[in-house]
């Protein structure tokens, strides 16, 4: 995501965000067989700016020429190809007068000396502003944004871009799902559209679903998505109406990450607001910062923000970063978390910086450019091959005998044919069970675990049932979800749960656990804030609770704050939170706030074979192969073709042959009779392996081959093949795709080809 103040402030800040066929734009106009005109040498053309997107990087030279490298599958390198590049060799075609850059998720834009804007890359949501956007559209070469000839500043979010016009007004194009363009409609805009009611603007910043603008002599304003405090007004309410961010008066620059925003004051101080789960707003991980919060940092010359990371260049030429430390994003030489802005290793005399989704770069006077963090697509430009941006079905390393797979929030576990288990991905709470807390991008074995018959991965803990009916759990124990009776907040090795010796199945939720016992009874423990264990809301977390009235359970599934079971009759019983209708009992508006301790029946469902639960929705596979879902539907996760929440079941469109079901946080997947995996709902981070940001109806997922089972996690999905191999899609921040590749550098490395 990207921000810039107008030139009068003398600041230039970066932050993240062929023939005419198949939705791509034509290549260079040079006649066939003709030699392209020779370009002046770059040797005497110093770097003037660097910016990062999602797995790709662009650098602007003083002459106005631009080089891009990294992921190129959507044409975001602007060189007429769709290839990844791991060095900075090729120039963006048809562009020699750029004065500013703004990079998004998979598109890039350049402000030109004429005041026009040129964009390239994906255009599925109108990101290029040329009026030709739509499903599958993209351009591998720059195209001109319609309706802009007077831009003086530019910023790109993940999938939208905004410019400040010479007269101080704002125009935007691209995605508008969250009203991030200040227009009270959800439709994408394909050309530049003026934002009403804004004037005297001097800067703009764009995040994933929100936009903020600096006003001359006044407080900043923000609009769009607000659920994580992005508006900075003390609340979580978003919308098209601009909201004042008090305390930002006199700011000289503004930068937006995915869900947070920072300003720089004239005195060189920094204040941030919004998402703060990784400490990206305050420097220390915690609750969202609903209002601007000052950091203990002075002498700041530039401020930039990435997905969950913030970096600042100081007046003394050093760089400090804070927020998410995974994949070496802070440049400290380590992936260890920090509690305050940390010094980037080995950098001095820095002239400018830029931050992408999960990587960052800094340049010195001349042509010396360094990058660190994730190398997806080759974004670091050091010549090392990153994970291909076109790879949609990588195989989990050294795993060819899996018989069951369970996906947690940011990690995955598998039960193997010999009764052992393997886990991979995030491990900060010991959720991989191997006695350590380092993340693993290839399967590791939970210590001392054998004869496993059932395994479940939850928010940041996991549990397994062994052949003797005993249950062992490991990982986070913040809410007593391990059931071990100890006071430790995390346990890094499997530990036996007392009082249980007849378990046949285990299920794990965000912070609670349930087991199905041999007679069909269900016992739960852990977080009971919403009665999801069957205990009264707020009950003792470590206490084992026999779920009332449930003695014939045949299978279980646990969501974030609710639980469900299939009964022997085929009915489905659910309990816990019902705030979004996730219990499916048709509760009225006044009843939705009541926590349910005794299971209630999902209305009009008597033939379920399997049930799945997610963040706020649930689904059932019926004996006929049809599917029904209920609850939250803001990302299309019910598969009904709408985004309307339902308190009773609705049929999933077009599915009559499902044989396996799994429900993730806000997406849902099934295996069809022929072995194909189809999914619907949220596709953030590519968890479904498709191009669209979401799908309201089932679509074929980007797996290769045929499958017998599927596991949907927080932002990744894994498929189990008949041969015991596992493929995973989606987020790989912590190695949850299990490919066994070290794909990041935690300290700055020199970019080649500059």
Image (spheres, grey):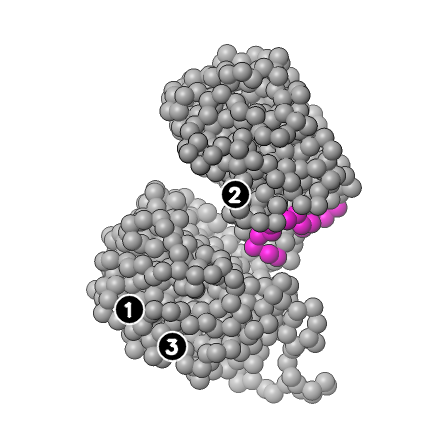
Q: Which residue is mark 1?
A: 215
Magenta-drawn segment: 691-705
Q: Mark 1 falls on what kind of element? A: strand
Category of crowding for the residue at label 2, using alpha-carbon neighbours closer than 10 angstroms: few (below 14), some (14–19), many (at least 20)? many
| Coordinates of residue 418 in the picture (x, y in percent) | 69, 25
Distance CA(mark 2)–CA(mark 3)? 39 Å
Q: Quadrant of residue 315?
A: bottom left
Circles 2 and 1: CB atoms closer than 8 Å = no
Distance CA(mark 3)–CA(mark 1)? 13 Å
Residue shown at the point (73%, 35%) measured from the top left: 625
| Coordinates of residue 642 in the picture (x, y in percent) | 58, 49
Task: Return the mark for residue 645.
Answer: 2
Q: Is residue 687 above or below residue 661?
A: below
Q: Is residue 659 above or below residue 735?
A: above
**Residue 196 lies in magenta, yes or no?**
no
Q: Which residue is mark 3?
A: 165
């Amino acid at each position: 995501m990207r921000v810039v103040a107008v030139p009068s402030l003398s600041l230039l800040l970066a932050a993240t965000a062929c023939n005419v066929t198949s939705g791509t734009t034509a290549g260079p106009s040079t006649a066939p067989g003709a030699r392209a005109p020779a370009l002046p040498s770059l040797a005497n053309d110093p770097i003037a700016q660097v910016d990062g997107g999602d797995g790709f990087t662009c650098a602007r030279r003083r002459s106005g020429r631009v080089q891009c490298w990294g992921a190129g599958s959507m044409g975001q390198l602007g060189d007429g190809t769709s290839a990844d590049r791991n060095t900075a060799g090729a120039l963006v075609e048809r562009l020699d007068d750029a004065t500013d850059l703004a990079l998004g998720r998979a598109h890039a834009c350049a402000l030109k000396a004429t005041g026009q804007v040129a964009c390239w890359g994906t255009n599925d949501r109108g990101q290029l502003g040329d009026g030709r956007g739509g499903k599958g559209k993209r351009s591998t070469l720059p195209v001109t944004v319609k309706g802009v000839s007077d831009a003086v500043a530019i910023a790109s979010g993940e999938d939208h871009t905004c410019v400040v016009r010479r007269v101080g007004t704002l125009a935007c194009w691209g995605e508008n799902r969250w009203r991030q363009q200040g227009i009270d409609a959800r439709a994408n805009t394909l050309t530049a559209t003026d934002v009403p009611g804004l004037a005297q603007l001097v800067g703009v910043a764009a995040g994933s679903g929100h936009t903020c603008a600096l006003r001359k002599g006044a407080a900043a304003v923000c609009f769009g998505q607000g659920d994580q405090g992005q508006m900075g007004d003390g609340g979580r309410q978003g919308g098209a109406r601009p909201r004042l961010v008090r305390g930002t008066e006199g700011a000289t620059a503004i930068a937006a990450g995915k869900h947070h925003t920072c300003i720089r004051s004239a005195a060189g101080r920094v204040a941030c607001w919004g998402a703060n789960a990784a400490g990206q707003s305050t420097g220390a991980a915690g609750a969202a910062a609903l209002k601007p919060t000052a950091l203990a940092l002075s002498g700041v010359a530039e401020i930039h923000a990435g997905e969950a990371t913030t970096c600042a260049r100081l007046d003394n030429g050093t760089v400090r970063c804070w927020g998410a430390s995974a994949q070496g994003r802070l440049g400290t030489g380590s992936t260890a978390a920090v509690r305050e802005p940390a010094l980037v290793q080995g950098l001095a005399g820095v002239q400018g910086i830029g931050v992408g989704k999960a990587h960052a770069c800094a340049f010195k006077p001349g042509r010396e450019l360094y990058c660190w963090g994730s190398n997806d697509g080759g974004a670091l430009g050091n010549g090392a091959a990153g994970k291909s941006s076109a790879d949609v079905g990588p195989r989990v390393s050294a795993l060819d005998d899996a018989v069951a797979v369970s996906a947690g929030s940011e990690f995955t576990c598998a039960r193997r044919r010999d009764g052992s288990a393997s886990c991979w991905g995030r491990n900060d709470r010991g959720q991989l069970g191997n006695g350590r807390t380092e993340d693993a991008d290839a399967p590791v074995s939970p210590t001392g675990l054998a004869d496993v018959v059932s395994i479940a991965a939850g928010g940041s803990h996991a549990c397994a049932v062994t052949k003797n009916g005993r249950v062992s759990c490991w990982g986070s124990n913040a809410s007593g979800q391990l059931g071990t009776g100890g006071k430790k907040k995390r346990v890094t090795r499997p530990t036996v749960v007392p009082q249980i010796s007849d378990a046949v199945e285990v299920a794990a939720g965000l912070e609670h656990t349930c087991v199905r016992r041999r007679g069909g009874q269900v016992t739960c423990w852990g977080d009971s804030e919403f009665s999801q264990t069957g205990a009264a809301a707020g009950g003792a977390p470590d206490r084992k609770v026999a779920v009332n009235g449930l003695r014939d359970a045949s299978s279980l599934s646990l969501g974030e704050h609710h639980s469900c079971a299939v009964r022997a009759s085929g009915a489905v019983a659910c309990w816990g939170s019902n705030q979004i209708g996730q219990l499916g009992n048709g509760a009225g508006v006044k009843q939705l706030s009541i926590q349910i301790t005794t299971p209630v029946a999902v209305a009009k469902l008597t033939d379920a074979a399997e049930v799945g639960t997610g963040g706020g929705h649930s689904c059932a596979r019926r004996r006929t192969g049809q599917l029904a879902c209920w609850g939250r539907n803001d990302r299309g996760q019910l598969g009904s073709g709408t985004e309307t929440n339902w308190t009773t079941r609705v049929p999933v469109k077009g599915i009559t042959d499902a044989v396996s079901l799994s429900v993730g946080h806000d997406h849902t997947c099934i295996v069809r009779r022929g072995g194909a995996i189809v999914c619907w709902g949220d596709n953030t981070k590519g968890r479904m392996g498709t191009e669209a940001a979401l799908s309201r109806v089932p679509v074929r997922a980007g797996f290769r081959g045929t499958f017998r089972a599927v596991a949907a996690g927080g932002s990744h999905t894994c498929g189990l093949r008949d041969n015991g191999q596992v493929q995973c899609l989606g987020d790989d921040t912590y190695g949850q795709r299990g490919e066994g590749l070290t794909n990041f550098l935690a300290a700055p490395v020199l970019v080649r080809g500059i």
